[in-house]
Image (tube, rainbow, N blue to C red):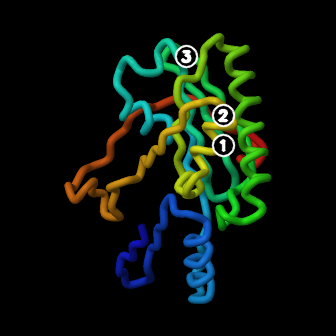
Amino acid sequence: MLEAEPAATGSRVLMAAVPRARRDWVVAVLAQAGLEPEVVDLEPLAALNALFAELPLHAAVDEAVGLLDVGGRHAALHIASRRGGLLTRTVGPDAPADPASPQEHGFRLKLSAGIEQTITFYRGRYRQEIATIHAAGGGALAEGRLAALAAATGKRFELFQPLAGLGARGEIDGRPVGPEYLMACGLCRWWDGAHV
């Protein structure tokens, strides 16, 4: 999604959850135009809130759910359950721009190993299985990537698009809405986001 809002002092540009190849081109064009674009990843608690808001109430009670964010700077896996238990961990680097490139195989190996290690740790710590891994971010849109991860890990993967239908002016699917707060919580992160 690429949107510009005219203003007296400049424009705002937002691009959300797009493959790296498309993102890098737009970032380069913006940089040449004198803008300083910043690539950011979706905050874990906000992403989990969006996921739990869409899941049925009975989901993620006896089993945990995973949220794999293949984002702008790295891939992170967030695992949570409605009974308690939250783990967020960086499981891989940023996805290759071209899923058909030779780097893709190595990326998938690193990512599947990181996913399996994280699931093993969560299972040991919280004594819960992970039912499904919901994949978000531009890197999750690459053709064949989720199927390959499912085959490598033995887990079910589903595409999750928390920003689908969200417009720049605060409307969802064309309907104007105000802010919606799903959770307030007293957690914060004291370390830098690159080494979770």
Q: Is residue 177 left or right of residue 93?
A: left
Quarter of the C terminus within the rendering: top right
In this rendered view, identify the residue nearer to me: 189 or 168.
168
Above or below, 26 relative to 108: below
Residue with the mark numbered 3:
84
Disc 2: which residue: 88
Residue 186: image quadrant is top right
The reply, left or right, for residue 133 in relation to residue 178 is right
Q: Which mark is residue 76?
A: 1
Name which residue lies at 60% across and 29% down. Answer: 79
Callout 1, which amino acid?
Answer: Ala
Q: Is residue 105 above or below residue 36?
A: above
Q: Position of residue 31 (x, y in %)?
A: 62, 83
Residue type at numbered disc 2: Thr
Circle number at residue 11 = none
Q: Name the residue: 59% across, 87% down.
A: 34
Residues packed near mark 2 inside 10 Å, few (<14), some (14 to 19) or many (20 plus): some
